[in-house]
């Protein structure tokens, strides 16, 4: 029986029958991977919008009204995720993303008024959220030109890798919950070495 990556590749290479675009009465064979590639940009944009809107809403800002001065304050010293408000807003965005993708079990809501919410994630998950936020903030601050050369999300993977590596020293190397975030890969030495 196939498992993991081999199973996923086999599924993506399968053909399915669907109606032709030109003539609905004719069926054609199409690889699953071709259909997935058409969905990916829309899914990526939906996640981006969810993350960015949740983050700025938690800060009490509107992303469309983000000015250069505020953006520079958020970039300075990585305040967009290091400051208390920034971290809480990032955790709100991460929780919203987990709920959207069906991973709500990674979020432990407070049991009493004095408890806080705890989100269990990898450093890569947290960096995925902060990469989307950093992209918007850098564009608003004028420190970087648009990353778009083609499709939605082009250029975000290298930005995510850089973000993971930048964040590694800022987070504990343990699996204990700290300020609402439990890094499940906290003790893993390779957590800051995502592969291209």
Image (cartoon, helix red, strand yellow):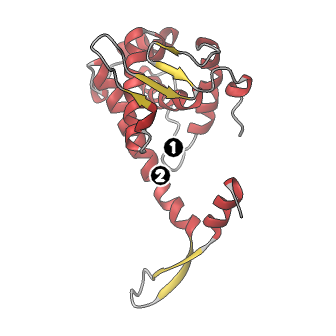
Give the x, y percent position of residue 68.
37, 17
Whether residue 71 appears in this view of the structure is no
Disc 2 and disc 1 in contact, CB within 8 angstroms: yes
Identify the secondary structure beneath mark 1: loop
What's the residue at 64%, 13% (across, down)?
169
Separation of residues labelled 2 and 1 (CA atoms): 7 Å
Q: Earlier in the sequence, mark 2 or mark 1?
A: 2
In the image, residue 13 above or below residue 73 = below
What's the residue at 41%, 44% (across, down)?
102
In the image, residue 78 above or below residue 34 = above
Report the front residue among 61 and 111: 111
Instruction: Residue under label 1, please give it.
Output: 153
Quadrant position of the C terminus in the picture: top right
Instruction: Residue under label 2, please give it.
Output: 41
Give the x, y percent position of residue 1.
71, 64
Report the front residue among 157 and 106: 106
In the image, residue 169 above or below residue 142 = above
- Is residue 57 rendered to the left or right of residue 26? left
Identify the secondary structure beneath mark 2: helix
What's the residue at 67%, 53% (across, down)?
4
């Amino acid at each position: 029986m196939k498992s993991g990556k081999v199973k996923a590749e086999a599924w993506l290479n399968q053909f399915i029958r669907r109606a032709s675009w030109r003539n609905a009465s004719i069926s054609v064979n199409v690889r699953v991977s071709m259909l997935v590639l058409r969905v990916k940009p829309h899914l990526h944009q939906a996640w981006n919008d969810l993350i960015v809107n949740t983050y700025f809403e938690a800060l009490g800002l509107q992303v469309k009204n983000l000015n250069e001065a505020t953006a520079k304050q958020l970039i300075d010293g990585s305040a967009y995720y290091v400051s208390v408000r920034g971290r809480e807003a990032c955790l709100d965005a991460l929780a919203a993303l987990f709920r959207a993708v069906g991973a709500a079990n990674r979020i432990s809501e407070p049991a009493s008024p004095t408890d806080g919410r705890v989100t269990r994630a990898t450093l890569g998950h947290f960096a995925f959220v902060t990469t989307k936020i950093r992209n918007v903030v850098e564009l608003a601050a004028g420190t970087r030109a648009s990353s778009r050369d083609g499709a939605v999300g082009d250029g975000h993977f290298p930005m995510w890798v850089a973000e993971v590596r930048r964040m590694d020293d800022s987070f504990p190397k343990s699996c204990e919950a700290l300020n609402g975030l439990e890094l499940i890969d906290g003790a893993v030495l390779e957590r800051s070495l995502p592969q291209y």
